Amino acid sequence: MADSPSTLPTARTSGDTAEIVALLRENVAGPVDADRRRRAEYSTDASNYRVVPDVVVFPLDTDDVLAIADVSRRTSTPLTMRGGGTSVAGNSIGPGIVVDLSRSVNRVIEIDPEARTARVEPGLVLGALQKKAAVHGLRFGPDPSTWARCTIGGMIGNNACGSHSLVFGRTADNVVDLDVLDGRGRRFTAGSGLDGVPGLEDFAQGKLELFRTELGRFGRQVSGYSLEHLLPEKGRNLAAALVGTEGTCGVVLGATVTLVDVPVEPILLVLGYPSMFAAADAVPAILTHHPGAIEGLDARLVDVVRRMRGDAAVSDLPSGAGWLLVELSGSDRRETLDRADKLTRDASAISARVITSAAAAKSVWRIREDGAGLGGRTAAGNQTWPGFEDAAVPPENLGGYLRDFDAMLNEYGIEGAPYGHFGDGCIHIRLDIPLDHDGDVLRSMMQDAARLVARHGGSLSGEHGDGRARSELLPLMYSREAIASFAAFKHIFDPQNLLNPGVVVQPAPLDRDLRRPAALPLLSVNGLAFTHDDGDFTKAVHRCVGVGKCRADNTATGGFMCPSFIATNDEKDSTRGRARVLQEMANGTLVDRDWRAPEVHDALDLCLSCKACSSDCPAGVDMAAYKTEMLHQTYKGRLRPITHYVLGWLPRWARLVSPLSRLINPVLSLRWIEKLVLTLGGMDSRRSIPAFAATSFTASQRKSPAGSPAPRGDKQVLLWVDSFSDNFSPTIAHSAIAVLEAAGYSVVTPERPACCGLTWITTGQLTGARRILGKLMDDFYPLVAEGIPVLGLEPSCTAVLRSDLLELFPDDPRAQAIAQNTYTLAELLSAPTPVGPASTWSPPRLDGCDVVVQPHCHHHSVMGFSPDARLLEELGASVTPLAGCCGLAGNFGMEKGHFDVSVAVAENAMLPALRAAAPGAILLADGFSCRTQASQLAEVDGIHLAELLAARLIATAPATTTI
């Protein structure tokens, strides 16, 4: 018939693409990028799918977006709009032109606190809107777990909901109007009323019965198009009808959204149940108490959290095998607690805990927010995938649906850990579907699951849209007439089928364009073991499922990931962007299957190897390890960059030069000589070379006069004085000895200096690193075997023994023993017997100490900084903790080409904090890199925890002065 949509756009030749790119560059002010690395970064989102675009465009403003759409229509090129790229159904990727709105088209145009509305651009990150609205005591109601990086345009595309939809509704319920450009080139304001779009009134009038019977049956029915909003009784609300169309009917240029009050003094009620099914059964009764949120957690997800983050991460959960997180709020705390008590009595729970502390509640909510990443591996370590990610059923059917769904998964031998918005009947789950070779099981399982959802009166999607994952399954949920109405609705706005083709209408097959089957194994050869990924680099890089937490400014919540992205706001410099390029290398079609591929080296160039992603990424991506492996495989047996020999061998040079420090330091203090040395060594001449110690720790030990031995405690500890502490900061080691002996330890030092090979590891010289670490194990293991703990002073070196050592020697029991018995100073001083200090020892008080703390990235990511934070708090220090990398990151900030980014990273947290610090404040920075960065960029000298405690030992002794 006349209104039937056209077929999918056909593939383009390279000549066509060149013409399109030229037209875009001629008409668009923002960057237009068609190189292979950029296209690799945008070839996928948070879904299972891979569709390589012809070109990626970064518009500067709305006029650029209009120009891009004009080129799309003129050349019949598909157009896909993208925000944070967190879509799990494959609805923010596509062929042709992909447009990233998040970089520049991201303003809050106006907030009207009286009207309780905001006018925003589509690339605005939700967290940025919430921050600005909070000044007025307001917020945008929907709050998906990706709030820190998802955009308003993406939320409009998917009809996002979040944890508080019970009170605030879906995005469709919070949109006043939309500034829309459709596929015909018409720009109009979509609000209430259908007059502005020719043919829409007649279309809606002829479908009233269909809309009333098949659509809008329960709150989370978002699959297909939500055309029930076109009904007269729904206000003929075109804006609401366009929300959730996944960019297939129009390009959103702006939106007016409603704002709601920030919840007042919320409390969190955590209810424990014998199973997830029992928790689901309790939901209808709990809903009668009108809570703000009801979220569910399964024991399988909690077990993953416990394995990755330790028992402390789940310590606030009461007993059970399934939990409901129920939020209540109100201005009267006593009344809210009374509501919680009444709710608990009706909840049929076997355990309950009321959490009133905002910090404790935040840690529990973090489990829920990180669910998509934490659920990325089963307890057995198998990779899980989205696809059937967010199906929903009416809440009263939830218990029965979960039982049937679990039985279906058992038949397939598939596992997953359910969680999600139980109050809305919306379940999130990632499943270990075998996708290494093909999508056969995926197709069969998805079809059976779709039939199951339909049988329970549910929706294939409860908030993420249908995308490429579920659009093909819509006929299992809807009648032929409903499917035809979706096609007719799209045709009104996009007759050429250029806007996000393959989604909802004329869908692509759900097992086409799968990313994982196209990636071949890359088995480790003499590199890192990748033990948790079966020695397969391909499997390791596919840990990145695209949740995009690396794109958020995690420093606000105590995270460190991803410093380079925060500095540049470029997908290239996010952990996810790098992982996508490495995945493309494993694929071998867009990026060559070659470690030396220029796209790979370009993608990893600004990775600081901070390892923050290894702890902050909920999927456990370790980009520092991937960069090390890439450098190792690239330069194995080949000539390396000069910095690999200068900075990569720094401990070796330091050991040779240190005895000549009294000669070398004055020479290098001549700026022209220093700049020449830096330039010849491949370093940035704006840097300075740290001064060598006048006397290294090793030299001072040799020169110590014979005499009475120092008092010895009843416990021994092996003080490991690393190359940095030895040759640049020996006072740290001397201070550590003073503290340890005061704590009742007998301090043992190795007979010869011990290097961990850190700089060899970060530059990918793994053969040399193994040789160096082998010597260290020869020296350390006999003492460790006797039960003597190892105390590391330099966090990055300590982290090598706790993590990299196991990757380089996975089958050596000595490595495991050393890793398990290596401590930081705070860990050792806080440890219980027999490792901890003498029971009679009291650490020196730090009352009156105003301390700015810059944790080293490796300290944060590998060991965890919480023991240090607790110790400082218990000793009475006034602490200003910093989150985020200092920016130097070992050799990174010294290398030529990295200086500007290094400074920009320092501006994320450290430099502003130092400028704002009170007079007399102390910079506590255990890391040599952190102290060097502070000294060079802010002229602030930092000290180590050992130095701080040792100074207080002296200060609190009789007849001494204070710091």
Image (cartoon, rainbow, N blue to C red):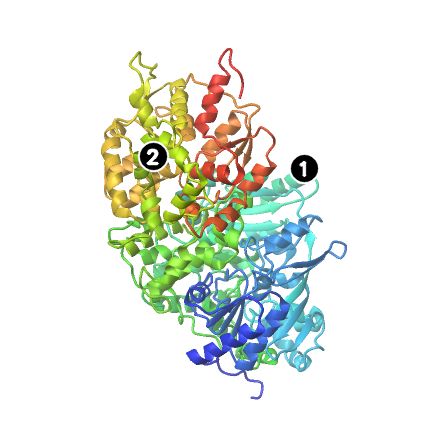
Q: Position of residue 139 (x, y in %)?
A: 66, 52
Q: Position of residue 366 (x, y in %)?
A: 51, 46
Lower position in the chain sequence, tag 2 or tag 1: 1
Q: Could you say which disc has been placed on residue 270 in the image?
A: none
Q: Could you say which disc has been placed on residue 723 in the image?
A: 2
Looking at the picture, tell me which residue is in the foreground, 364 or 500: 500
Looking at the picture, tell me which residue is in the foreground, 84 or 596: 596
**For the residues marked 2 and 1, what is the alpha-carbon distance in whole angstroms?**
58 Å
Circle 1: element type: helix
What residue sits 70% from the left and 42% below the top? 331
What residue would you read off at disc 1?
334
* Residue 718 visible somewhere in the drawing: no
Q: Position of residue 8 (x, y in %)?
A: 48, 80
Q: Position of residue 577 (x, y in %)?
A: 44, 58
Identify residue type, mark 1.
Answer: Arg
Side of 281 where 186 appears, left or right: right
Looking at the image, residue 711 lies above or below residue 354: above
Q: Residues within 10 Å of mark 1 (few under 14, many from 20)?
A: few
| Displayed quadrant of residue 403 | bottom left
* Residue 675 visible somewhere in the drawing: yes
Looking at the image, residue 69 lies above or below residue 868: below
| Displayed quadrant of residue 783 | top left
Residue situated furthest bottom in the rendering: 1
Task: Look at the image and tell me in which quarter the N terminus lies.
Answer: bottom right
Circle 2: element type: helix
